[in-house]
Image (cartoon, helix red, strand yellow):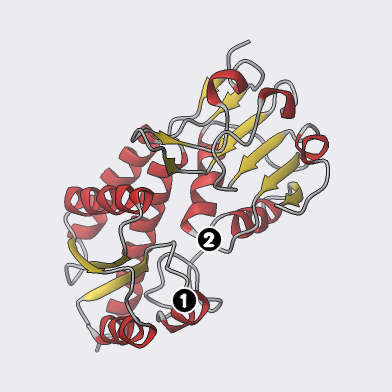
Amino acid sequence: MTAKILSGKAVRDQILNDLMVMIKKLKRKPTLAIVLVGNDPASEVYVREKEKAAAGIGIDFQLIKKPSNVKQNELEEIIINLTRDKKVKGIVVQKPLPNQIDGEKIDRLVSPEKDIDGLNPASYFHSTTAQGVVRLIKENKIEIAGKDTVVVGRSKLSGLPTALLLLEEDATVTICHSKTRNLKEKTKQADILVSAAGVPNLIKADMVKKGAVVIDVGTMRTKEGKIVGDVDFENVKNVASYISPVPGGVGPMIVAGLMMNLVEASESIDKQVV
């Protein structure tokens, strides 16, 4: 058995085409502002994809790039200024952030109505990663309700919101993390296995239930320049029924979800303008 590939590209393209039509109807052309700190290779890949998508659907894109030694107060001032900027309808602070930055404080500083990444506890939006995972599953007509689902990783950016959104879809969800004992025993029980740990090739074929749906959220660049995920793709695809590749799986869905949130934010903010 070879797994069916869960490609996010076709779904993303359809979503972006629909958004292009919606953007033409907006009162004001929105601006997406992204703050990128340092030069993390995976982050730079994601930012380029977001910029490409923004250009494709006709919205303005603003990239604010700061060195990895940026100070907390400087980053906070940037966020405050973007919140005040009426042209900016969506703000993204690209993760990860360097250790000297209080990421929680930065997330809370982003206006809830412009927090299209869904990281402020008061955000108007779901996490784009969680949305991407769930929509990728649904678009392939895979049932979620009642399924035993394991999410590996508990970060606020990926693992935790994905687990919560799957729970909203009536899955039975187990969250595993770095302190989980006997990880293989847990993952082997999953009808749907989502890995968002950020550990290359963490999920091996013998950790996957035969016929399981495997979603790989991990995105890392090797020393050789190759983009890889959490899942040992070449071997796991012979066990799973469905598997998402890296790149090309969840990544495009995250970008599409971000643009969906941006358009929704733009419509909501425009209605508030008298």
Q: Marks 1 and 2: in contact by CB < 8 Å?
A: no
Q: Is residue 168 above or below residue 107?
A: above
Image check: 220 left or right of 149?
left
**How many C-alpha atoms fall within 10 Å of the one at disc 2: few (<14), some, or many (≥20)?**
some
Find numbered disc 2 in the image and state the secondary structure of the residue it sits on: loop
Amino acid carrying mark 1 in the image: Asp
Q: Residue at x 19, y 77 (%)?
A: 87
Amino acid carrying mark 2 in the image: Leu
Which one is nearer the viewer's eye here, 129 or 260? 129
Q: Which mark is residue 157?
A: 2
Residue 157 percent coordinates (x, y): 53, 61
**How many C-alpha atoms fall within 10 Å of the one at disc 1: few (<14), some, or many (≥20)?**
many
Q: Residue at x 61, y 22 (%)?
A: 236
Residue 141 percent coordinates (x, y): 57, 32
Q: Is residue 188 above or below residue 22?
A: above
Q: Residue at x 27, y 80 (%)?
A: 82
Quadrant of the image occupied by residue 269: bottom left
Which one is nearer the viewer's eye here, 272 or 243? 243
Q: Which mark is residue 107?
A: 1
Q: Which mark is residue 238?
A: none
Residue 213 percent coordinates (x, y): 64, 30
Q: Quadrant of the C terminus?
A: bottom left
Residue reaching furthest to the top: 1
Q: Residue at x 51, y 43 (%)?
A: 218
Q: Is residue 205 above or below residue 17?
A: above
Q: Is residue 271 above or below residue 36?
A: below
Q: Quadrant of the N terminus?
A: top right
Residue 226 percent coordinates (x, y): 37, 33
